């Protein structure tokens, strides 16, 4: 996923269908300079992690 689209999703009030390794996730923050995003699985909000934007897929 490109950084601009990830940022749009992160700032939108509408929940988009985004997956990381097949798991539905929520994007909290995007670091365009590093090409990374702070995410968490929808069913595990306490399991925050930082991943490469390349791992994110929008359905």
Image: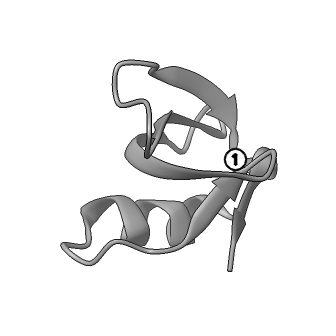
**Residue depicted at x 67% and y 57%:** 19
Between residues 3 and 10, which one lies in front from this camera angle? 10
Q: In the rendered view, how is the structure colored?
A: one colour
Q: Residue furthest front?
A: 43
Between residues 8 and 59, which one lies in front from this camera angle? 59
Image quadrant where one finds the N terminus:
bottom right
Left or right: 20, with 43 as reference point:
right
**Residue depicted at x 45% and y 21%:** 48
Find residue 34 and report its image quarter.
top right
Left or right: 45, with 31 as reference point:
left
Residue 18 drawn at (x, y percent): 59, 64
**Residue depicted at x 52% and y 49%:** 25
Residue 16 drawn at (x, y percent): 44, 74
Disc 1 packing (10 Å; few <14; some 14–19; many ≥20): many
Find residue 3 and report its image quarter.
bottom right
**Residue 9 seen by the camera:** yes
Total numbered badges shown on the rendered structure = 1
In the rendered image of this protein, does residue 14 appear above or below residue 31? below
In the rendered image of this protein, does residue 57 appear above or below residue 22? below
Image quadrant where one finds the C terminus:
bottom right
Left or right: 55, with 14 as reference point:
right
Between residues 3 and 27, which one lies in front from this camera angle? 27
- Tag 1 secondary structure: helix
Residue 9 drawn at (x, y percent): 41, 68
Between residues 29 and 46, which one lies in front from this camera angle? 46
Residue underneath mark 1: 53
């Amino acid at each position: 996923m490109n950084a601009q689209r990830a940022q749009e999703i992160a700032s939108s009030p509408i929940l988009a269908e985004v997956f990381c390794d097949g798991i539905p996730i929520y994007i909290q923050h995007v670091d365009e300079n590093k090409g990374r995003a702070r995410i968490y699985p929808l069913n595990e909000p306490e399991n925050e992690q930082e991943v490469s934007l390349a791992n994110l897929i929008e359905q």
